[in-house]
Amino acid sequence: MAIEEEQSILFAERPEWADVTPLAQYENINPVAPIFYTNEYKDAADYFRGIVNAGEMSPRVLELTEKIIRMNPAHYSAWQYRYKTLMALKSPLDVELHLMDEIAVKYLKTYQVWHHRRLIVTQTRNPGPELAFIAKSLQADTKNYHTWSYRQWILAYFNDDELWDAELPFVEEMLENDLRNNSAWHHRFFVVFQAGVRKGDEDRDEVIRRELGFVKQSISVAPNNASAWNYLRGILDHNGTPYSDLQTFVNPYSVPHTLEETAEGVVDLENPLPSKESHLPAVAAIEFMADIYEKEGGDSLMKATELWKSLANEHDTIRKKYWEYRIREACQKVTT
């Protein structure tokens, strides 16, 4: 009998399952919102409740739970019982991971898939191959939250220098492919600032300079990339650096046109200017400059108000209510 034909046969029709008493899902006599399951799913779920009730943990339980998971990958109880059965049987976990390779890519956005994988890798204690698997998974969905979260868990849980060493080149490749990948920017911040310095010869001030240079260059290529501006703010906030220290860099991005060189005719490598193809002014740059002026207070508060007005009425009208709120807050500061 072909495998496909065998899998399509209901468990109620299989002689090897005759010893199991299926348990139907309990519902009220007149449920408000009855769920209409397929016969195949109802059959498998009834037998699953039956084996759980009997406390059975056997190879056929793995077959049953796989069947349910393929029909409903978010079935938490099936995943949990499958894991308990794997542990009880001392099943080869490399085989389980191979199966998870297929299921995880197919159901990338299902949390239970990744949680089960975490449990298995916690047992195997072999995180190395996981990073390659994750990189392959990200090809299917470069911004998938569960995939990135799992990668960060691998790095943090095992905390191995060999794993960390390859992360910055990896995330730079991801950003090279898509400079607007917010997930990749978030991961870069995690690797650089939340993982701690991994090498004794890495100076924190040098790291800050490197990251500022990287994000400035990225902004110069794509000034309207909100992810890069958020990363810039993250660096400054993490290091306690005043936003005003970046005024020379930010200001050219907050106006419609800018010079390509400094007054002396020398390009400022510390403060790269927007590319010729840039659409200026950049909303994030206007907001950044407004924040600088607001922090300065006094007469500068009026400058901030004018910038917020330009955002509300011209450059960022979708957030008009927010900018009007900022203006009201500033006016209250002036009058008090």
Image (spheres, helix red, strand yellow):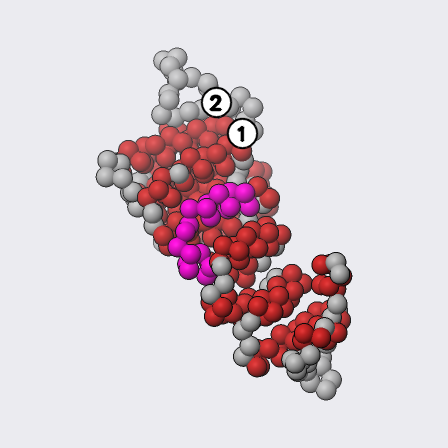
Q: CB of mark 1 within 8 Å of CB of mark 2?
A: yes
Does residue 289 appear anywhere in the picture? no
Q: Residue at x 54, y 79 (%)?
A: 55
The number of discs equals 2
Cα distance, mark 1 to mark 2? 9 Å
Q: Amino acid at mark 1?
A: Leu
**Residue 137: x and y, percent?**
55, 46
Q: Nearer the viewer, residue 269 or 151?
A: 151
In the picture of the structure, the residue carrying the numbered disc 1 is 280
Image quadrant holding the C terminus, namely: bottom left
Secondary structure predominantly adopted by residues drawn in magenta? helix
Q: Is residue 225 left or right of residue 299?
A: right
Q: Mark 1 or mark 2, which has the lower sequence index?
A: 2
The quarter of the picture where the N terminus appears is bottom right
Few, some or many residues within 10 Å of mark 2 (<14, 14–19, 20+):
some
Query: To which quarter of the image does residue 202 belong?
Result: top left
Residue 151 shown left or right of residue 70 in the figure: left
Q: Is residue 188 inside the magenta stretch?
A: no
Give neighbour class at mark 1: few <14, some 14-19, many 20+ (Cα, 10 Å).
many
Which label belongs to residue 258? 2
Expressed as whole percent of the image width and height from the top left, the position of residue 304 reads 43, 40
